[in-house]
Image (cartoon, grey):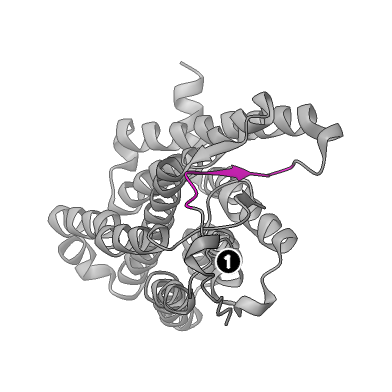
């Protein structure tokens, strides 16, 4: 763990803002990166927004699975919007300064939306578990009230912990450099700038990551181990293929999102390097939200049919 000694009071200067370095080391690629990330952001908004709208409008998509998918798509839009617009502004204007309050707000919302995604993915795996392993009781178990409760819990259960954690982090004394070698205000780059003892804060990061990333991931693995065992017992190859097809899209999204998030937040602090953190963060904050709608739409016949119906009108 990184235990930093607090400097004498006379050397302590309270920081009121930070500088997000982002891609400052690649000035020759500034406008290329701006255009690339702007296109990606538009794709994320349009694709996730389209899935959100068609799952609300199409009568054939009024089931718990698509209700959860709509919420997941909306969380993707919120998650990306917590970081990408600021990065685009910094690339376009070269004004990389961000106030302490704005930095804390960005980190807090990024964590809240990220945790919501983890929990929603766990809820979606539970939905598939009930649908495949207990199909006769599916309408009873996954009724509208239960679906609302699961989604509400996914959005809200982490909020008190994450607000408190953000407050604890930004209550630390910051001194010396105010440069964050990242493109948004993330946990570990912020802790690197603190000149107090950050051991407790680092332990809280791992606690939050275990509770809201690792536990949902293990629940998903447990659900899919049961699902796969049931599918393999089906006598018909056609039935097996159909059951696998309903789960494969969700499983691919789980691997993409949780893989990068677990590597980022649960590996030892001594192995955190600025370059690796930025690459991993780009993966789960930008690339995964861009690919997820494509995975769901290209591998889901109901979504494809609904898209064709509305596009051909």
Q: Is residue 21 magenta?
A: yes
- Find residue 115 and report its horizontal and vertical position in percent: 39, 60
Instruction: Give the side of residue 156 with respect to residue 202, left or right.
Output: left
- Left/right placement of residue 257 relative to residue 207 reads right
Question: At 33% from the left edge and 69% from the top edge, which residue is drawn?
Answer: 126
- Which of 111 and 58 lies nearest the eye of the viewer? 111
Pick the front one: 72 or 155: 155
Q: Main structural element of the magenta stretch: helix, strand or loop?
A: loop
Q: Does residue 111 lie above or below 298 as drawn?
A: below
Q: Which residues are magenta?
A: 14-23
Measured as percent of width and height from the top left, residue 283 is found at 64, 54
Mark 1, Cα crowd under 10 Å, few <14 / some 14-19 / many 20+, is: few
The structure residue drawn at horizontal position 48% and vertical position 73%, both measured from the top left corner, is 198
- What residue sits 70% from the left and 56% below the top? 279
Identify the residue position indicated by label 1 in the image.
255
Please identify the residue farthest to the top as the structure is shown.
313
**Quadrant assignment for the C terminus:** top left
Q: Position of residue 244 (x, y in %)?
A: 52, 66
Which residue is outermost to the front?
A: 10
Q: Is residue 277 above or below residue 180?
A: below
């Amino acid at each position: 763990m990184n235990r930093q000694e607090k400097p004498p009071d006379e050397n302590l200067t309270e920081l009121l803002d930070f500088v997000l370095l982002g891609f400052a080391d690649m000035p020759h690629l500034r406008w290329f990166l701006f255009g690339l990330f702007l296109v990606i952001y538009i794709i994320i908004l349009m694709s996730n927004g389209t899935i959100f709208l068609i799952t609300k409008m199409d009568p054939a998509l009024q089931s718990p699975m698509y209700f959860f998918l709509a919420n997941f798509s909306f969380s993707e839009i919120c998650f990306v919007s917590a970081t990408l617009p600021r990065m685009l502004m910094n690339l376009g204007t070269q004004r990389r300064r961000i106030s302490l309050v704005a930095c804390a707000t960005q980190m807090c919302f990024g964590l809240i939306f990220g945790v919501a995604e983890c929990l929603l993915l766990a809820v979606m795996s539970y939905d598939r578990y009930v649908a495949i392993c207990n199909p006769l009781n599916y309408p009873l178990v996954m009724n509208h009230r239960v679906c609302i409760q699961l989604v509400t819990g996914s959005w809200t259960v982490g909020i008190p912990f994450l607000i408190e954690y953000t407050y604890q982090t930004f209550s630390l004394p910051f001194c010396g450099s105010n440069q964050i070698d990242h493109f948004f205000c993330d946990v570990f780059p912020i802790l690197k700038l603190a000149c107090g003892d950050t051991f407790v804060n680092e332990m809280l990061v791992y606690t939050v990551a275990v509770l809201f990333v690792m536990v949902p991931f293990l629940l998903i693995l447990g659900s899919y181990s049961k699902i796969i065992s049931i599918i393999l017992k089906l006598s018909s190859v056609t039935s097996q293929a159909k059951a696998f097809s309903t789960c494969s899209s969700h499983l691919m999204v789980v691997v993409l999102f949780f893989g990068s998030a677990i590597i980022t937040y649960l590996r030892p602090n001594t192995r955190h390097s600025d370059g690796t953190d930025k690459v991993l963060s780009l993966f789960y904050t930008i690339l995964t939200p861009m690919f997820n709608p494509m995975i769901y739409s290209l591998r889901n016949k109901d979504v494809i049919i609904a898209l064709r119906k509305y596009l051909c009108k």
